[in-house]
Amino acid sequence: MASAKQTAHLSAPVYHAKKSLSNLTVVPAEHLHKTANLSYQVAGKRYYPLQKVASFSQVGRASYYGQNFHGRRTSSGERFDSQMLTAAHPTLPIPSYARVTNLSNGKTVVVRVNDRGPFHANRVMDLSYAAAQKLGFVRAGTAQVRVEQVLPGESLQPAGSGGNIYVDLQKFANKELAQQYLKATTQHLQAAGSAQQAKLVKVKNSYVVRMGPFQQQQRADEARKSMLTTL
């Protein structure tokens, strides 16, 4: 989490309940913070935040904020609220949204990235207490997760429960080609007697064919690899 010294000059709005993810159905497009995305240095290491919201995927260890951080300013200037679904990341744009999946149990949650950190070599993200609770690792303290940037306009899937994991198969600029691929994927799943389905999702100017739902991320990744090899 950002230190008080790092955030004293920021003046973004205070984060409050009205901006809760529970009130959103799709990811909003927000203006990036003017200073929270500049290059910065911590403990002798320089970090270069991403300058736009784009496809991003990372696997690593996640932890969560201690309760003593509740009420402190984040890098965005917003007050940290342990009961909101927020997170800190070293380089993802601020503000932006990320889907975090606990790879040990398949639970997933969408969080709003509004802070910098954690600055530990073996950690990729710090989550709020509420997000860690949704992912089921409060007692363990850390978890192996997959972090994926969620792009503006994407639907927010229900958070915190197993059985809602979808994987992207192919992305198309042409809707007709996407529909053809969707049809072929659906036929293959039906022929195999699979419980999963394929669906077409529009993301900005692209069309993405997704497959799911799965209970476990490992199973989802295996099925994706198999499908891409088959089609």
Image: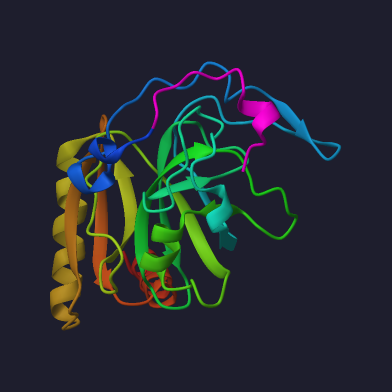
**Percent x, y for residue 84?**
36, 49
Query: What residue do we see at 23% from left, 55% from top?
Result: 157
Colour basis: rainbow
Most foreground residue, 67 or 41: 67
Most foreground residue, 40 or 226: 40
Most foreground residue, 150 or 88: 88
Numbered range of the magenta stretch: 1-14
In the picture, the quarter occupied by the C terminus is: bottom left
Q: Is residue 180 above or below residue 131?
A: above
Residue extending furthest right?
A: 44
The picture quadrant where one finds residue 97 is top left
**Percent x, y for residue 147?**
48, 54
Residue 11 is inside the magenta segment: yes
In the picture, the quarter occupied by the N terminus is: top right
Query: Is residue 175 rendered to the left or right of residue 35?
Result: left
Q: In this rendering, does residue 58 appear at all?
A: no
Query: Is residue 138 rendered to the left or right of residue 170?
Result: right
Query: What residue do we see at 22% from left, 59% from top?
Result: 158
**Percent x, y for residue 54?**
44, 34
Q: Is residue 14 above or below residue 180?
A: above
Query: What residue do we see at 15% from left, 65% from top?
Result: 186
**What predominant SS class does the magenta segment belong to?**
loop
Query: Is residue 86 rendered to the left or right of residue 160?
Result: right
The picture quadrant where one finds residue 143 is bottom right
Q: In this rendering, does residue 196 appear at all?
A: yes
Counting the numbered discs, the total is 0
Query: What residue do we see at 72% from left, 28% from top?
Result: 40
**Percent x, y for residue 15?**
37, 34
Residue 149 is inside the magenta segment: no
